[in-house]
Image: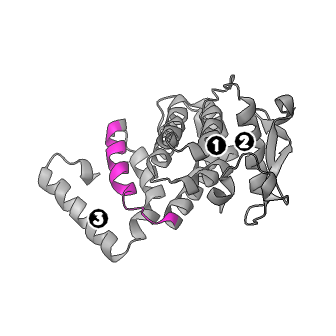
Amino acid sequence: MLLKDQDDKIRDLVKLFLHELHSKHNDTIYNLIPEAINRLSECEHFKVDDFEDIAKILVKYVEKDKQIEMLLDKLCQKLSNSQSKLTSSPNSLDRKEVRNTAYTISILNISEKHLPKLMDHYDKYKACIQKDEHVRNSFKSIPPKFKKNNDIKDLIDLMESKFSIDGTNQLPLSSESKAVAERFNDLKKRKGRRGNIAMAPAHVVVGNDQPMDLEDDEPMEVAGADTNSVNRKRKFDDISQ
C-alpha cells in the first residue's frame, strides 16, 4: 500500500526495497503476488487505479518463463475457486478480488509459448468471463498483443472468440477457427509428444462443447503422416512444447 503513499520519498523507498529484495531473492515477490491480490482487494478505500498501478510494479519482477507459467496456474486456479464470489453485488470486495486477479493475468509478460497454457485453463475461468464484464475485458486485452504474429493468427482468433462470451452469446467462429479449436484440443491430448504432421478432415468442439462438422471438410493437421503432403503448416506444436 505504501507504493501509493502521498509522500514521494516513501514511494521511492518502497520501490528501492522491492528492487533489492528481488535482486537477492528473485522468487519472493513472485510468491507473494496471489496474497497481495487478496490483501489489496480487501481495502475498501483502494480504487481500481490504485490496484492496477501496484500490480504493474509487482508483475515486472516476474521475469522467468517458469515463473510466469506457474503464476498463470495459480491465478487461473484462484479464479476457479472464486466463481461463487461472482454472485455477490457488483461492487463487493469479493467481486473486486476476482476482477483484480483477472487484471493481473492480463498484464503478465505472457509470450507466445504461454498462450496454450492460458487456454489449457480456459474451463477454470470461463464462468468468470461470462458473469463479469470487467473480467471479460481483462482477458480480451490479451489477444491483441499478438496480432502481428501471423503464425498464430488462428489461435488468436480462437482466443478472441472464447474471451467474448457474455453468458448468453458467443461470437461466431469461422470454419478456420473451428479447425483451430479442434487442433488445440488435439494438442492438449498429445502434449509432450512430437510427430510428423499432415492434413486431414476433422470435427471440432466449440462454444457449448458440442461436436460440429467443419464446413466443406476443412482440413486439419494430424500426427503421423508424411510431411511432404502438408499444404499448410502451423506452428502450434512448437508453441505447445
Q: Look at the image and say whether residue 116 sits in the magenta stretch.
A: no
Q: Residues within 10 Å of mark 3 (few under 14, many from 20)?
A: some
Residue 240 located left or right of residue 66: right
Q: Are marks 2 and 3 in contact (CB under 8 Å)?
A: no
Q: Position of residue 184 (x, y in %)?
A: 73, 48
Residue to which mark 2 is pinned: 180
Residue 167 located left or right of residue 231: left
Of labels 2 and 1, earlier in sequence is 1
Q: Type of residue at label 1? A: Leu
Residue 176 located left or right of residue 54: right
Look at the image and tell me whether residue 45 can be seen: no
Q: Type of residue at label 2? A: Val
Quadrant of the rendered structure where residue 163 is?
top right
**Residue sitting at the far bottom:** 24
Residue to which mark 3 is pinned: 18
Residue at image position (44%, 51%) is 37
Q: Look at the image and say whether residue 53 sits in the magenta stretch.
A: yes
Write the start and end of the magenta stretch as one range: 49-65
Q: Position of residue 151 (x, y in %)?
A: 59, 47
Please name whichever residue, 222 or 124, is drawn nearer the observer in this view of the structure: 222
Name the chief secondary structure element in magenta: helix
Instruction: Measure the C-alpha gap from mark 2 to mark 1.
Output: 6 Å
Q: Say what secondary structure mark 2 lies in.
A: helix
Of labels 1 and 3, earlier in sequence is 3
Residue to which mark 1 is pinned: 155
Q: Type of residue at label 3? A: Leu
Instruction: Measure the C-alpha gap from mark 2 to mark 3.
Output: 42 Å
Q: Are marks 2 and 1 in contact (CB under 8 Å)?
A: yes
Residue 115 located left or right of residue 57: right
Quadrant of the rendered structure where residue 48 is?
top left
